[in-house]
């Protein structure tokens, strides 16, 4: 008794062929994809004309990145203790890095839980990272105007020493 019929061979042959074809398609598509550039780090905001409760602060934008997904915190830092405390808190901003948008690929939104004077205000941050410089716009829910800002990324060696890595 033969277990190899023409129907069985045709079925298994086409199933294997389909799997090979799908693997080839996925592999070809995967090699054309590129990971977004790494933008995570700490950016010191140097602009002085920030809106409302952010105006008199020394601000640091902390960005954490996982592929295209971003988490962040906008914190007021005057001392190393404040920075250490801010680094331990859960980020209050979420967003995406959209590399196809050439004008403002960075987009973070959330609330300002880390700054006492701005407690629970909604904020939107959009910007463009070029090397170690982040140029963007901040909009607070309580201020109708959008304000531009510039931030400079701190050196990674300094970041690693302070975070204990």
Image: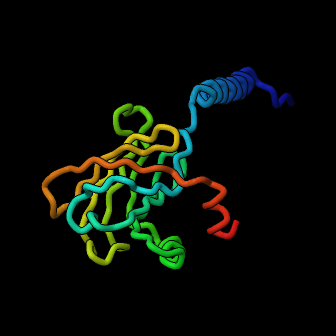
Residue shown at 47% from the left, 55% from the top: 43
Residue 137 visible here = yes
> Where on the picture, by quarter, is residue 38?
top right
Q: Relative to 6, say whether 123 is above or below.
A: below
Q: Depth check: 104 or 154 in front?
A: 154
Image-based side of 15 in relation to 48, left or right: right
Q: Position of residue 97 (x, y in %)?
A: 44, 44
Give me the residue at 66% from left, 29% from top.
Answer: 23
User: Residue 109 is drawn in which quadrant?
Assistant: bottom left
Looking at the picture, the colour scheme in use is rainbow
Relative image position of residue 42 (x, y in whole percent): 51, 57
Point out the image quarter for the N terminus: top right
Compared to residue 88, the image places residue 127 above or below, namely above
Q: Nearer the viewer, residue 38 or 147?
A: 147
User: Residue 7: x, y in percent?
Assistant: 69, 23
Q: Is residue 144 left or right of residue 162?
A: left
Q: Position of residue 22 (x, y in %)?
A: 62, 28
Query: At 57% from the left edge and 31% from the top edge, which residue is drawn?
Result: 33
Would residue 7 be visible to someone looking at this image? no
On the rendered structure, is 137 left or right of 134?
left
Q: Is residue 75 above or below residue 2?
A: below
Query: What residue appears at the point 48 percent right and 77 percent down from the top-left corner?
Result: 82
Residue found farthest to the left: 144
Name the quadrant of the C terminus. Answer: bottom right
| 112 left or right, relative to 81 | left
Extreme-right residue of the structure: 1
* Total marks in image: 0
Which quadrant of the view contains residue 135?
A: top left
């Amino acid at each position: 008794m033969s277990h190899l019929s023409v129907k069985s061979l045709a079925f298994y042959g086409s199933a294997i062929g389909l799997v090979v074809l799908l693997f080839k398609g996925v592999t070809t598509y995967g090699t054309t994809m590129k990971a977004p550039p790494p933008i995570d780090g700490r950016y010191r905001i140097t602009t002085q004309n920030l809106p409302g409760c952010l105006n008199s602060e020394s601000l640091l934008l902390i960005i954490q990145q996982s592929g295209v997904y971003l988490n962040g915190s906008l914190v007021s830092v005057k001392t190393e203790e404040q920075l250490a405390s801010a680094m331990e808190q859960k980020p209050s901003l979420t967003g995406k890095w959209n590399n196809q948008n050439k004008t403002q690929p960075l987009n973070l939104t959330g609330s300002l839980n880390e700054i006492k004077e701005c407690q629970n205000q909604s904020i939107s941050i959009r910007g463009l990272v070029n090397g170690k410089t982040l140029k963007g716009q901040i909009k607070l829910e309580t201020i109708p105007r959008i304000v531009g800002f510039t931030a400079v990324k701190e050196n990674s060696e300094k970041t690693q020493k302070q975070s204990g890595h």
